[in-house]
Amino acid sequence: MQWFYLLVYLFEAIIAYMYFSDNYELKLKRGVSLLIAVLLYVAAFAVNLFGNNNIIFNTVYLLFSTLIFSKVSFNISWKSAVFHSSILIAIMLITEILVESSASSIMHIPIDAYRDSTSALIILGIICKVLYLIICKLISVLYSYKKNNAVTDMKRTFLLFLYPIMVTVTLLLLFYMDTVYDISKGFSILFSGISIASLALCCFIFVYNQFLQKHENELVSLKSQNEKNEMNKTFYSLLEKKNDEQRVLIHDIKHHLSAIGSMDTTQQIREYLSSINNDFDNYDSIGKSNNKMLDLILNKYSMLCSKSNIEFHIDIRSSNLDFIDDSDLVSLIGNLMDNALEAAAKSANPSVSFLTKRERYFVVLTVKNTCSVAPKEVNHKLLSTKENSELHGYGTKSIEKIVRKYDGVNDWEYDDDNKMFTYNIVFNMNEE
């Protein structure tokens, strides 16, 4: 049975790694961090093996190993490391006690009935670790949500718990059959193998999901950084454009002043000023909303619409979105406008509208665009229309993440008669 106990310690190392990596930033490479966890838990197994199974000493040593692992591998304070390490060890002990006592009371099986059965002990031990994994991941998800106020995909994360729950029920049935019925040695070995493989698959599913979520977050962050870089380029391009316009304006003013100076009557001057008034209206300023970043973003898309012959309407009323951080504003509006321009460019009489307004405790942001084809959607969730769609769709996820961060809700609708797509976001500004 020593091989099984070693395997249990390895699973516990993997679960501890998942728990801390869910909530804290790694200092080391993933492989190195996981290797440290494995080595520390193998050392804890060796202490248990040669320490005559002293429960108190083994528990303290395992707590110490978890503490060292978390502190060495992650950016975490000593206080947090002690707290979370204690949580893990407490969950581990509680699940072992509850599973063993519950198995005896619910199934009416005396504890002594399976003490001498290797397969029953293995199944029961695996059930303990599956429940340990479920509770640790649940705490990790809730802690991460509270800490970050957003999780990449809460629904997908909670759906993952269905598998380990089903595994737990299945293992309980196997445990009951192994202890109540007189099954052959071959079936006992099969039951033990199924139990170990089930726990391994549970760990793999959660580790792989963790990898996918971090990969998605990295792609969203990379997209956000690219948007910032693009915005910086646009900023300098706009400044250069405005400087050129100002030089032309100054040159024109000199000619206008010269012309005015040659006039004899006030009436002539008034008529001349009235005739050139429209010329000055053509020189737009970057500042329109008193939010420099919003002005810059809107000027960028105004310029892009002009180049693509897309009609662009801006209506900023009682809100300039100044409660949103610049980096989030760039990602939010950038993704909304990129999608709008892409769809409008493929439609007849292309146009895009950008509207913000405040209504009591709410700020409403609306982006409308012409769209000749109804958008792809499943359960009212927008799907990417680009080739290799699995590599796209992060713009929509970025929008939803930012909306959640600022206590907002988002929805969209498509008017097939007018071929118009509308994306609405409502932010709750009630501070109570």
Image (spheres, rainbow, N blue to C red):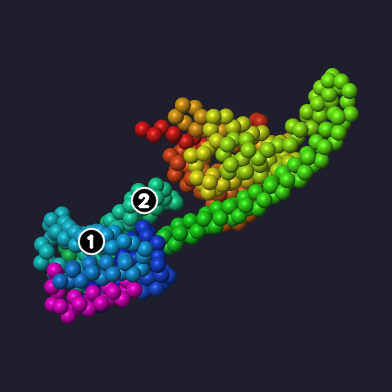
- Quarter holding the N terminus is bottom left
Q: Quadrant of residue 347?
A: top right
The secondary structure that dominates the magenta segment is helix
Query: On the rendered structure, is 290 left or right of 129?
Result: right
Q: Residue at x 84, y 19 (%)?
A: 267
User: Magenta includes 48?
Assistant: yes
Q: Amino acid under label 1?
A: Ser
Q: Position of residue 203 (x, y in %)?
A: 35, 64
Q: Quadrant of residue 290?
A: top right
How much space separates mark 2 and mark 1, taking CA atoms?
A: 19 Å
Q: Does residue 144 sit above or below 369 in this rendering?
A: below
Which residue is more in the foreground, 110 or 369?
A: 369
Q: Position of residue 404 (x, y in %)?
A: 45, 43
The range drawn in magenta is 36-56
Which residue is more in the foreground, 133 or 142?
A: 142
Residue 81 in sight in this render: no
Check disc 1 and report the residue beneath it.
86
Label number found at residue 147: 2
